[in-house]
């Protein structure tokens, strides 16, 4: 090396830039890229912590496809979970429109609605568990007090009610986040569009469907992607509220992955499950991108 | 019973009962009990230490990487593309190998192992990049003419001018590490020596142990 290399200012700067980037790159390599590759590799192997790896081919995928009933239940639940996000988006769009109007104290409502988002999901799960509780829960109390039901509903114990109940709690938590995204989208719509429409005599619903919705498309797309991702990140909520039960009624793919890997120690099989979910997520995201007119690239361009 | 009484009357009667929602003789003993039923201070300290490591690592590493990305160097576009594609990979999709890697490094049940994956976040790197790019070029040039070395330009010119970015990063990384659940759940599978505050209540309610002081083991 010597002074020749080090003497040049350009080289010194390159080394400095490399040193600056290296720690972050190392972390992302170690915890994003390497795991992704390892996941794929692991899914084609027979492997457990104390055994040497053996090539398995598509064995795990075959097992998943034809023998693992829980996988299909979990897949269905995950898709339902994702399919519920439009409801959350619609609700938050309504709230966003409300707090965006010159309602009195709109900023207070805005803060209150948003507050659910930075809450810990675990705490949210525990609180909702209490509210859903069969004996002491406030929801059952209210339902019985108003005479809607005669017997208490075991929301999280009932096979039919468990998944909607968990989804409802999930929607409750994410609505604040969606609302903020949609609100920034709403506020970036130029007001002269509305003025022009009003002068042209367009009724309110036409203004909403012809101006607001098209202009909100990028924000809505972002919400949809977050909703798709939520199927991954809702592990906390499901784990705390039902742990996949009763039976496997609220099992999501991510809880199935967790149980296979860390409770049954089937790391290889869980890796195959992870690959399936990741591919599913990518496909859905690309589909959402296509549906949004492919303008998600606008996010990446800058 | 609902069938016999006229419904509006019933509603009225129960409307009075809604007062039940308000706690009767409220007391603060639950807050005291927590300190005895679980090693609460320990969990709290664990959470704080892990979050502090994560926040410190985030601010330093993201500022460095963000600064590097404002400079021109060969392979810059490749690094940018790499970062952006890493954003696509949700952390939950990497838990199994991430766990195995952490185990290989001997970091299970350690503070550092808990904080490691959170040490740098791509979103915040871009926040820093944008903040640094917003600093007027002339200020940096002036500092350079005055003969400041590169690291002092960063410390004395760029960082003070990008305080909002630092604040954003501190808030976000703190929330992310404080609310993190899955990773601590995996990494602290064994004795409660190093379990963050968050994972504890969840495990406890699962086996309903936080109402009975005798059950000390929860998992």
Image (cartoon, coloured by chain):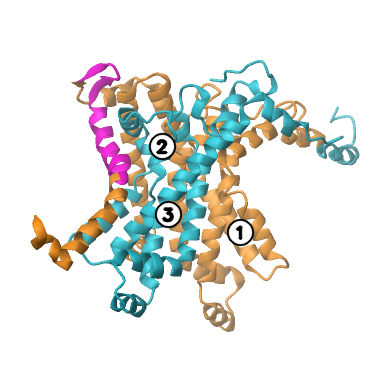
Q: In the image, B140: left or right of A190?
A: left
Chain letter for the part of the structure drawn in orange? A
In this figure, which residue is indicated by the disc labeled 2?
B112
User: Dot 2: within a 10 Å radius of its alpha carbon, few (fewer than 14), some, or many (20 or more) residues?
Assistant: some
Q: CA distance from mark 1 to mark 2?
A: 43 Å
Which residue lies at the image location 63% right of the left edge and 34% below the top edge?
Answer: A126
| Pair 1/2: label in front | 2
A67 in relation to A138, above or below: above
B28 in relation to A45, above or below: below
In this figure, which residue is indicated by the disc labeled 3?
B59
Q: Are marks 2 and 3 in contact (CB under 8 Å)?
A: no
Q: Which residues are magenta?
A: A27-53
In this figure, which residue is indicated by the disc labeled 1?
A94
Q: Is residue B22 magenta?
A: no
| Pair 3/1: label in front | 3
Chain letter for the part of the structure drawn in cyan? B
Q: Which mark is residue A266?
A: none
Residue B141: image quadrant is bottom left
Locate the C terminus of chain A and report the quarter of the image it occupies: bottom left
Q: Chain of mark 3?
A: B
Give percent across and percent down for residue A116: 61, 48
Give percent across and percent down for residue A20: 29, 56
Both on one chain, marks 2 and 3? yes
Q: CA distance from mark 2 to mark 3?
A: 16 Å
Mark 2 and mark 3 lie on one chain; the one further toward the N terminus is 3
């Amino acid at each position: 090396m010597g002074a020749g290399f080090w003497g040049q200012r350009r080289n010194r700067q390159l080394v400095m830039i490399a040193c600056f980037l290296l720690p972050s790159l190392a972390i992302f390599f170690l915890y994003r890229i390497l795991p992704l590759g390892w996941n794929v590799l692991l899914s084609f192997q027979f492997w457990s912590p104390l055994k040497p790896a053996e090539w398995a081919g598509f064995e795990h995928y075959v097992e998943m496809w034809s023998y693992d009933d829980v996988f299909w239940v979990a897949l269905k639940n995950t898709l339902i979970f994702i399919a519920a996000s439009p409801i959350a988006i619609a609700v938050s769009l309504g709230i966003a429109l409300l707090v965006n109007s010159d309602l009195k104290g709109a900023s207070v409502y805005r803060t209150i609605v948003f507050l659910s988002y930075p809450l810990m999901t675990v705490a949210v799960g525990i609180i909702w568990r209490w509210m859903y509780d069969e004996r002491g829960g406030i929801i059952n109390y209210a339902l019985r007090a108003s005479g809607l039901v005669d017997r208490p509903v075991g929301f999280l114990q009932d096979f039919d009610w468990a998944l909607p109940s968990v989804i409802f709690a999930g929607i409750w938590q994410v609505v604040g986040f969606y609302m903020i995204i949609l609100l920034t989208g709403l506020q970036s719509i130029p007001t002269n569009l509305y003025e022009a429409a009003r002068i042209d005599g367009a009724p309110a619903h036409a203004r909403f469907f012809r101006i607001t919705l098209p202009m909100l498309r990028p924000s809505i797309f972002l919400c949809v992607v977050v909703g798709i991702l939520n199927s991954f990140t809702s592990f906390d909520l499901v784990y705390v509220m039902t742990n996949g039960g009763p039976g496997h009624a609220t099992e999501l793919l991510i809880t199935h992955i967790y149980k296979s890997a860390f409770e049954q120690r089937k790391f290889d099989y869980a890796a195959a499950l992870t690959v399936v979910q990741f591919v599913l997520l990518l496909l859905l995201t690309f589909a959402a991108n296509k549906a949004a007119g492919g303008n998600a690239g606008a996010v990446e361009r800058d | 019973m609902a069938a016999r009484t006229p419904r509006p009357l019933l509603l009225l009667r129960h409307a009075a009962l809604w007062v039940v929602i308000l706690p009767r003789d409220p007391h603060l003993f639950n807050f005291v009990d927590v300190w005895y039923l679980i090693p609460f201070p320990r969990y709290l300290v664990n959470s704080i230490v892990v979050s502090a490591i994560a926040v410190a690592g985030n601010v330093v590493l993201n500022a460095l990487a963000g600064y590097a990305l404002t400079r021109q160097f060969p392979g810059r576009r490749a690094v940018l593309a790499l970062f952006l594609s890493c954003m696509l990979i949700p952390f939950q999709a990497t838990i199994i190998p991430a766990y195995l890697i952490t185990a290989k490094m001997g970091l299970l049940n350690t503070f550092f192992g808990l904080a490691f994956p959170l040490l740098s976040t791509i979103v915040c790197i871009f926040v820093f990049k944008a903040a640094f790019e917003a600093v007027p070029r002339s200020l940096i040039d002036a500092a350079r003419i005055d003969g400041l070395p590169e690291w002092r330009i960063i410390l004395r010119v760029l960082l003070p001018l990008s305080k909002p970015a630092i604040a954003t990063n501190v808030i976000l990384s703190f929330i992310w590490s404080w609310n993190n659940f899955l990773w601590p759940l995996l990494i602290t599978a064994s004795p409660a020596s190093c379990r963050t505050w968050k994972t504890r209540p969840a495990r406890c309610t699962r086996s309903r142990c936080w109402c009975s002081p005798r059950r000390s083991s929860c998992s």
